[in-house]
Amino acid sequence: MRFRMYMIYIFSALLFSLLVGCSKKEPTEPTELIDKRSGCQIDTYGSWTSPISASDVYGLSDNFGELQSVNDAVYFVQSDSASNGRVGIKRLDFDGSVSDAVSNEFDVRSKVHEHGGSPFLGIGQSLFVSKAKDQLLYRIAPNQEPVPLTPNGTRHADCVSYSKGSRIICVREDHRNQGMPVASLVALNLNFSGEGEQLISGADFYSAPRVSPDNNQMAWISWNHPNMPWDNTQLWVGELEPKGGLHNARRLIEDRQGSITQPLYSPNGQLYFVADFNNWWNLYRINSQGELEHVLDMEAEFAVPDWKLGNHNYAFESDNTIIASYNHKGVASLIRIYLDTGLTESIAVDFGEISQVVKGENGIYFVGAKVTPEKGVYKVNGRGTQLIYAPELPVLDPNYISRAENISFESGDGEQVFGYYYGPVNPGFVPPKDSRPPLLVMLHGGPTAKASLAFRRDIQFWTSRGFAVMDLNYRGSSGFGRKYRQSIYGRWGKADVEDAVRAAGHLVNKGWVDGLQLAMRGNSAGGLTVLSSLAFFDTFKAGVSYSGISDMEVLSKEADKFESKYLEHLVGLSTEEQNIYRQRSPLYHLEELDEPLLLIQGQDDALVAQKQSKTVFNALKAKGVPVAYLAFNGEEHGLKDPHNKIKALEVELAFYGKVFGFTPAGEQAPLRLENARNLKHDQ
């Protein structure tokens, strides 16, 4: 059966090549081989010439979001590849014109909870913006110099307007004293700078302050250690006083445990929110009698983990209708919910990701990324959607685009694990007879993040060169319900590793990939999975770790406040469980790691310190393992400068070429691989 499936795959590839390219031609080089049947060039997987360069992947940025509507325009943040990844604010007018809303000197980013989110608020003609460098909140008005409003040592985000726009309420993180920062909700008077008024404090974390339409009430979310916001949070409301202050703060739904997020008042003052009481992040409300009502019962996710502030997956189109996005098995859909009947109407089902659903003066807007290259700002247009803005990106030839196939397989515990498989696609090449492609297993961070079906140029970079890619949603990933998300608790460094190994084995058994050319790449928590897989299993023959975690114990001691107790869920808290930190930390098992490794790291990483990668590099170098280390000055957790991202991708390709014994097409990126003489397939 596996052989039959493989032959079908090969036949399909040949047929595709005949239809879209590879006409009969003569060799242009003495060593060039041409397949007589298809006219395609015969070359090793990984060596195929691709029109998709690293610059096509990262040279121009499609990284934008934080959408909000202000008067007659839509604003959003977007990183600028020409300015080393600086994040600015764009204004999108309804005629389709786009302009810069802040000067080039402004790098817009909040560091509340370190991960930030929701770094600006628009009121009238003014913007209130968190500046990356000093974390002060500035008022930016037309034809005026920016004015700082907040004290040094404080950070602000997720702000909302009230009191007719004369005040704003923000999440504050106060770093002015030693120890962990102090969280609160504060009200700032926009007419002058100063301390502001503290409305509520005492919890470890706050998010999502939202004001009722009559300005009389505020709802918010809080949570305490050791919970993360996707574990257990609390929904609160209080009464806002006309001249400032908050009273009668009270917690709602005390009898239910779960992750509550995204509170929002309806136009008539009812409080709505998303919670995972039934395993799935679904939409709920508090009715006029103060009772909890389940608005829509679906096995789908109407929220995402709040790593960042300011997520909003739904908005009120009218008193009776909500436009909401949800995720089901990797597909993002947009629906209209009729509140009086509970009926729904499909608007869009062809997206990989939908986020930042907001109401504007002229309709509902959202950020959407399709399974094809279209990503941008969309407007709901009746029963459909209209793309109104897309960043300028290099156009990719559709003949080189690989389409995802949903894959599932059983874990060692009999649980279903999910992922997306992308086969190699290049109309100009066919592989040598009886060969199979190398596999690249991609591992997201978190570990509570997720792989989605949203189009990714970096995946196409690999598949167009002859790689197969598996984008894995190992146990612990979001998007599949609370139970799946928490299935990694107590098993981090074990369940994710086993899933990566089984994913590769599943594809090898299908006959789709070469079992001797299995590689993996991951960032942050995904980097831990890479290192652990290489240390504890002999399945993979190469790995690339971006800002990877090598020592769980050090991470637990050095983590920022937001993540400082995260490992109590992921690993455990007892003395016996703390011993597991070392058992599962690849740093203490490097004697078992013999396969080639590339480590890529930001030198200013505050979340996973540079020493976590550098220590691994030094140990493997001394041991004689082929290893390379690439560090970038000025980079933090995850590369942001497009030039650095391009270099890292090109070096990664060169690394796989050295390990698997193929020569990548085009100019070779410089790679300093220590102990290269010990490679089994060195060319």
Image (tube, rainbow, N blue to C red):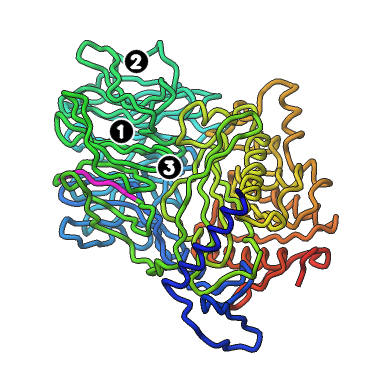
Q: Which residue is mark 3?
A: 330
- How far across and how far down the image is residue 451, in percent? 49, 45
Viewer-nearest of discs 1 and 2: 2
Q: On the picture, is 586 further left or further right than 365?
A: right
Q: Nearer the viewer, residue 478 or 602?
A: 478
Please state the horizontal and vertical placement of residue 610, each as a whole percent of the image: 66, 51
Amino acid type of the residue tagged 2 in the rendering: Leu
Q: Closer to the observer: label 3 or label 1?
A: 3
Where is residue 469 shown, x and y percent of the image? 56, 55
* 111 over 667 or under it: above or below: above
Mark 1 residue crowding within 10 angstroms, few (<14) / some (14–19) / many (20+): many
Q: Residue at x 15, y 29 (%)?
A: 320
Q: Residue at x 66, y 85 (%)?
A: 31
Residue 7 sits in quarter: bottom right
Residue corresponding to mark 2: 252
Q: Is residue 603 visible?
A: no
Residue type indicated by callout 3: Gly
Which residue does the numbered mark 1 point to in the structure image? 169
- Name the dominant secondary structure of the magenta segment: strand
